[in-house]
Image: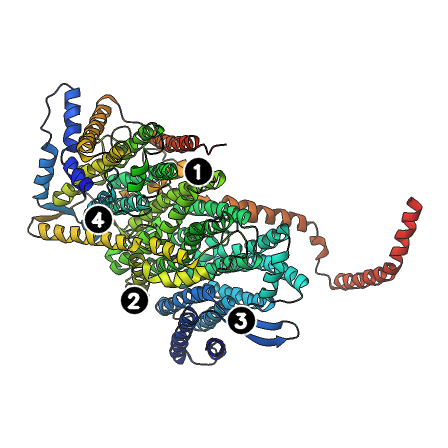
Amino acid sequence: MISFILIVLVSIVFSGVIIRTKSLASGRKGPGILQPMKDIVRLWRKGAVYSKTTSFVFQIAPSIYFASLIMAALLVPFGGEKGILSFQGDFVMFAYVLALGKFMMIISSLDTGSSFEGMGASREALYSMLTEPAFFILMGSFALFTGQSSFADIFNNLHLRSENAYMIGILAAFVLMFIAMIENSRMPIDDPKTHLELTMIHEVMILDNSGFDLGLILYSAQLKFAIYGALIANFFITSMPFTIAIPIFLGIQVLFAFIIGLFESFMARFRMNHNPQFVFILTSVAMLIFLGVLLVLGKLI
Amino acid sequence: MIKPGFEILNIIGLAAVVAIPLVGSKANKMMTSVVFCLLFSLSIALSVLVFYNGTQIFTYSGNIITGPITLKADYLSAWFISIIAFVFTIGYFYSKGYLKHYPERTSETKLHYAAFILGLISLIDICLIQNSLVFLFVWEIMTISITVLVIFESHKSEVLRAGMYYFIVSHIGLLMLFVAFLWGKANTGSYDFEAMASYMLSAPNSTKLIIYGLFFIGFGIKAGIFPFHVWLPVAHPAAPAHISGIMSGVVIKIGIFGIIRMLFIVHPDFCITGYIILFLSLVSGLYGVMLAIVQHNLKKMLAYHSIENIGLIGIGIGIGCLGIAYNMPLLFVLGFSGALLHVWNHALFKSLLFFCSGNIYQSAHTMNIDRLGGLNKQLPKTTMLFMSGAIAICGIPPFNGFVSEFMMYVGLYNGLQGGYFILSFWALFGIIIMALIGGLALMCFTKATGIIFLGNKRETKLEYKNTDNGNMIYPLFLLAIAIAIIGFAPFLLNKTLFSLISSLKVHTSQFVIYQPEIETYLREATHIGWFSICFILIIATVIILRKAIVVNKVKKEDHTWGCGYTGETVAMQYSGSSFIREYRKLAEFIFKTIKKKKAAKGLYPSKIEHSTHILDYIEIWLIDKPIKLLRLALNRFTFLQNGNIQVYLLYGLVFIMIILIYTSINQNIDTLLNFLKTKAL
């Protein structure tokens, strides 16, 4: 319960923190932290324009995308505290629930019949396919490390084994951060502020969405960040008392947003055809974590 | 109860096969419908009875060649019989709509339905027969009837070729089964499976492995496991849609049935077998989906997806075997129940997708994904059905594909934690590949759904007919409902799966499993249904809330945003090939691409064409190249066939001479050899 509330709270300010970091890094004062959320609320109140080509898919896709994120947020625990829904193998459901959202968004962008949006859809499908193994290996390593197979149990037992858990946790945080960046199409993969449709991924998929649906999609992006941030934070808070855990959770989320902001300020986007190589790095780092776990457990011959 | 039911089923079927050519076409329609309803209710009743009353065995005296013929209706056969009956019946009612588009082929239609019924009863019999000679006989009847079904459009040469391809490849499989069964007969003196099973208990490990290997290849060819999959992408596109659906949904599953049945008869070393099955299944899963993405033909794409799904089923079987080998009951339960549940699931969504592809074909008369587009305006119901099938086949919740994949994932994660290095390593490998398969399937089916049904028509000349009615749509809803039921409430199947899993008897000393254990594991695994229900409730809430909010808002319609360009953008839409172009570049090492490209020349270039054609390396290496070599070798002997009748008579004479000389020498040959030996020594 607590994790869900915190995720929703964080999601309200997440983009704000990123934008604030970026403006500070470029020497501007920048908008208030709540500005992106205010924009979203304004969109929620607006009417919409639909393309003549589109069908019912285009109308329901953003809602399903949003629902899939709500479902995913319900599965995320808060350290040892279980999420609202928790069961054996819940991380498999986590990944597959997000996949339904992706499925709908991809076909909804193909629904518009626009070549730009097809381009974005194609890239989204490819990159999310490539990131999938990294997440599963990561969870596999931690399942092996703790001997548990649900989010809450894994995080609960993470630090009982040894101090090495923090080391592995940092590597895991690295992988999860980049998974989050790819899933949200942020800097090294995609530039959300670019003005050329040919080089966009996520932004180009939603060119035709407007009004309430666009607001829903933009808010979903923030929610997704907050969910991944919560997962990262879970690697460190485990079963601490709430008085310490909640500040650490919030601190990690802000740090996460801050790092993304810095990345976007000081880095250029990769060339599109180099992206798969970059995504493969994540899988190999995840494999490294797995080998590390085997080493720590003394299973490696 | 089961024995008379089985007899009536066969008699009705055979009587119908005999009667169909004799009756006029009007009466035929009535008769086949009645026969199908009867066969369906009989076989469903049969499997329900088995699940209520337990295994039933009955014996016919047989004749001097076959020996006594035993039939055993156990849980495994009941499970497969229910699948066969369900998909065949849906397929039959669908075919009534589909074949309306071929009004001139009345005699072919009669033959088609006769083969249809024969195929159904032979498949059901295969699940029951315990006598290897009769088994092979019925297996052959099944193969022939399916071949007849495939070549319905026999006036097309490529259809005939595909039918022959299927026929020949099936017989290579038959040969393997023949050798394995004959070996059993030679050693036990009877054709009975039970005799073979009891003999196998004392056989050495290497023999068991070789015999199981033969069975695995024989049944694997039917199932389409890598590298024996080559016939699937050839035969499926050639057959009419309902037959493709049935082949993919049921006929290849009979291979899986054989693999599982023989596993518990031959009892090979479960560790080695498990790893081999797991490896081949992982490869076929990945290979199938990787080639599926790049296909232009929708049916070919679905055929490659069948290979992928057979791979997933095989992964489950592999996990189950490893569970036995490492004495981990959880792996055993989740592996086999995942595999067996996926057999049902795949039968449902794959036949649904193939039937939808039939609607597309009859509407647009092309299966080329890149030529289609915007079909949802003409076929809204087919679109909905295809989408639900696509979501199910990707293994995405809340539909049924997720349930069985979830079981396998949990099994793999438990194998990972098992504490054995090699098992952990392989489980991780399995997890990576299953995750990749999931992602690739998503890419493949977003392509199929998005390009075929959504957007605008890509070829303006193409005319769509409305096929969204009658028999071509309503039976499919039953499939979709079944998909949803298994997705939302897999716990309804708990009892069935429980008796199914506990009926798989393992005769190794170190593996022990207790009944309550199976029950708890299954209960925990199928618990996932509640979360799928929860998920669908969240989706429904969000959609309803959105509707309530949006209803009062301004709503306008306009062109798709085209970067300032507001004209016709039909030809500029993304096509299937462009959607997967980046993927194709990444994965090019795994298939052969033949590209034909002409550059535009001059100020006013004429029409240019660009085509990519994807070839399967396995088909090239396993089929095309050996056949080419064989042909080269045999070409040397063409001089023998010179059409001169005198020469042919001479051949006969020479042959008789050789036989005579051989027999006369044969008696002396030993003396000669002995003579040589003594001389040499």
Q: Quadrant of residue B237?
A: bottom left
Q: Amino acid at mark 4?
A: Ile
> Circle 4 sits in a helix, a strand or a loop, which is it?
helix
User: Label 4, on which residue?
Assistant: A64
Looking at the image, residue B620 sits to the left or right of residue A210; the answer is right
Counting from the top left corner in percent of width and height, residue B472 is at 32, 65
Q: Earlier in the sequence, mark 1 or mark 3?
A: 3
> Circle 3 sits in a helix, a strand or a loop, which is it?
strand
Counting from the top left corner in percent of width and height, residue A236 is at 27, 31
Look at discs 3 and 2 and give the one toward the viewer: 3
For the point 10% across and 48% down, which residue is it?
A: B556
Counting from the top left corner in percent of width and height, residue B508 is at 55, 54
Q: Quadrant of residue B655?
A: bottom right
Confirm whether circles 3 and 4 share one chain.
Answer: no
Q: Quadrant of residue A123?
A: top left
Q: Residue furthest top?
A: A27
User: Label 1, on which residue?
Assistant: B588
Return the mark for residue B474: 2
Confirm whether circles 2 and 4 share one chain.
Answer: no
Q: Earlier in the sequence, mark 3 or mark 2?
A: 3
Looking at the image, residue B444 sits to the left or right of residue B561; the answer is right
Q: Give the alpha-carbon distance from disc 3 to disc 2, as whole Å.
A: 36 Å
Q: Pointer 2 indicates a residue of which chain?
A: B
Q: Pointer 4 indicates a residue of which chain?
A: A
Q: Is residue B566 visible?
A: no
Q: Give the alpha-carbon distance from disc 1 to disc 2, as whole Å.
A: 41 Å
User: Label 3, on which residue?
Assistant: B71
